[in-house]
């Protein structure tokens, strides 16, 4: 009769310890198939445990098929058939390493301030403790909303009531809130060309979405037709890079008042203006409560921190509290309190100043590489000293598809401006490339020198 040393362990009852020992001996062959196990009474006396312990262990083995019971005879080890273990695992096909390319299409962020962020996280944990586990205000924690209001006042000249700020996990969530707040019966206008994901979100929300035509100064108010909601990015339009001047901004505010409509101001990368301060936000110019301001920390910090916010005018804020205040907050309190300290203690401003210098230096390297490449005499850079992308006009008889394919063969990924149009593409978009340098690998800029000469 086999002897097992059974000891009580936290969370492991004696019967389970005995079950594991017996199962191990069965699987290893120490108890071969067909061998008879001791009776429950005999094994209990031998191991100095209760009969109930042995009975429970045998019952578990029986239910799993390791043993069988024969009436008035006893328990016997059941034959087990296990798949043969291969002496060597089959070799999996080796995945090819990602190709080294100059990617001028990707968005991204670099140089995240990990040391500062982790320091603030530790402070939040020590200072707040179990408070972090309490339910969060549905608009977001007060500390973060106050910090955002103070930042916008200092950086954008905006007078903001923290009670009008709503924190959300990404702008997608906030867009959907606005659809419920403003209503599906309205017609929504989106910049043409523009960021197509916005159009898809509004379309998925069941609203009528139309093109907002643009000229060299931004959206044309007279081209908005029956629309009563306009979604724009006046501080740095994507993808053209246009910065809407103050005069046109005032015209758009006049349109919103006359149309009894609203303007959704997407100010997503206003922080990155290299030689001057950003123009006043539409929200700061609004005197009639017609502008909804939206921004995110995805560009300025990292997309991994899904924290965005919107600011509602007083009238809409009242409607929000009446109709939508039942929504729970969507951003973890831990991240909100950390970001609040990052803002209020001046770390965000320092980070933006560093990143502005970094991205300006990167942009200058891209521009220098373009000016030195074999195609330099047919390239024109179109930008307005803002944001993390610009337009490149290429004088070429090639179609946009042929141009993109030619550059791709040299390991250079680019995106044509025409891909951002929803409707008819104008002739002026021919040969226009959108170059995004926020996430490129600078060591691959040499690829521009491999463009074939004429």
Image: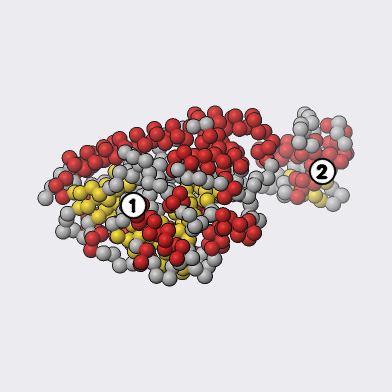
Q: Tell me where residue 209 appears, x and y as whole percent.
A: 44, 67
Along the viewing direction, whichever of 121 and 146 lies nearer the viewer: 146
Q: Tell me where residue 346 appears, x and y as whole percent.
A: 49, 32
Disc 1 and disc 2 in contact, CB within 8 angstroms: no
Going 75% across and 42% down the picture, which residue do you hit? 35
Circle on res. 446: none
Mark 1 Cα-neighbour bin, 10 Å: few <14, some 14–19, many ≥20: some
Q: Which residue is mark 1?
A: 245
In this image, 200 relative to 131: left or right?
left
In this view, the mark in front (1 or 2): 1
When the figure is inspected, residue 351 is found, relative to residue 454, above or below; the finding is above
Q: Which residue is mark 2?
A: 56
Earlier residue among tags 1 and 2? 2
Going 16% across and 50% down the picture, which residue do you hit? 378
Quarter of the image for residue 121 reads top right
In this image, 104 relative to 4: left or right?
left
Residue 238 shows in this picture:
no
Along the viewing direction, whichever of 318 and 427 lies nearer the viewer: 318
Along the viewing direction, whichever of 27 and 198 lies nearer the viewer: 198
Mark 2 Cα-neighbour bin, 10 Å: few <14, some 14–19, many ≥20: some
In this image, 344 relative to 379: left or right?
right
Label 1 SS: loop
């Amino acid at each position: 009769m086999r002897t097992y040393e059974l000891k009580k362990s936290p969370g492991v009852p004696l019967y389970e310890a005995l079950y594991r020992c017996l199962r191990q001996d069965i699987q290893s062959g120490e108890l071969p198939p067909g061998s008879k196990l001791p009776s429950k009474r005999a094994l209990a006396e031998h191991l100095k445990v209760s009969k109930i312990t042995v009975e429970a262990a045998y019952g578990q083995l029986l239910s799993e098929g390791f043993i069988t019971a024969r009436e008035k005879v006893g328990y016997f080890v059941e034959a087990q058939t296990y798949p043969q273990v291969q002496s060597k695992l089959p070799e999996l096909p080796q995945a090819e390493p990602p190709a080294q390319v100059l990617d001028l299409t990707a968005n991204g962020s670099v140089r995240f301030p990990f040391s500062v962020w982790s320091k603030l996280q530790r402070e939040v944990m020590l200072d707040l403790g179990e408070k972090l586990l309490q339910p969060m205000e549905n608009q977001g924690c007060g500390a973060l909303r106050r910090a955002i209001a103070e930042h916008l006042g200092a950086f954008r000249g905006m007078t903001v009531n923290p009670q009008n700020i709503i924190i959300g996990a990404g702008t997608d969530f906030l867009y959907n809130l606005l659809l419920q707040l403003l209503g599906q019966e309205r017609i929504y206008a989106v910049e043409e060309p523009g960021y197509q994901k916005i159009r898809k979100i509004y379309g998925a929300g069941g609203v009528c979405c139309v093109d907002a035509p643009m000229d060299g100064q931004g959206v044309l108010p007279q081209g908005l037709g029956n629309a009563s909601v306009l979604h724009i990015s006046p501080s740095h339009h994507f993808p053209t890079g246009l910065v809407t001047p103050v005069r046109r901004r005032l015209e758009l505010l006049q349109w919103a008042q006359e149309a009894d409509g609203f303007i959704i101001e997407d100010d997503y990368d206003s922080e990155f203006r290299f030689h001057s301060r950003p123009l006043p936000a539409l929200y700061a110019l609004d005197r009639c409560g017609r502008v909804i301001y939206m921004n995110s920390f995805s560009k300025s910090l990292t997309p991994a921190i899904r924290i965005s916010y919107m600011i509602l005018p007083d009238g809409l804020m009242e409607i929000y509290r009446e109709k939508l205040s039942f929504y729970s907050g969507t951003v973890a309190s831990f991240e909100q309190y950390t970001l609040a300290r990052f803002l209020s203690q001046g770390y965000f401003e320092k980070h933006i100043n560093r990143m502005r210098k970094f991205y300006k230096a990167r942009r200058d390297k891209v521009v220098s590489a373009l000016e030195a490449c074999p195609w330099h005499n047919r390239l024109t850079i179109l930008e307005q000293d803002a944001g993390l992308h610009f337009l490149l006009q290429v004088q070429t008889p090639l179609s946009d598809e042929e141009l993109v394919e030619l550059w791709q063969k040299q390991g250079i990924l680019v995106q044509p401006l025409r891909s951002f149009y929803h409707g008819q593409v104008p002739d002026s978009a021919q040969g226009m490339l959108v170059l995004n340098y926020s996430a490129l690998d600078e060591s691959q800029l040499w690829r521009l020198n491999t463009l074939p000469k004429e």
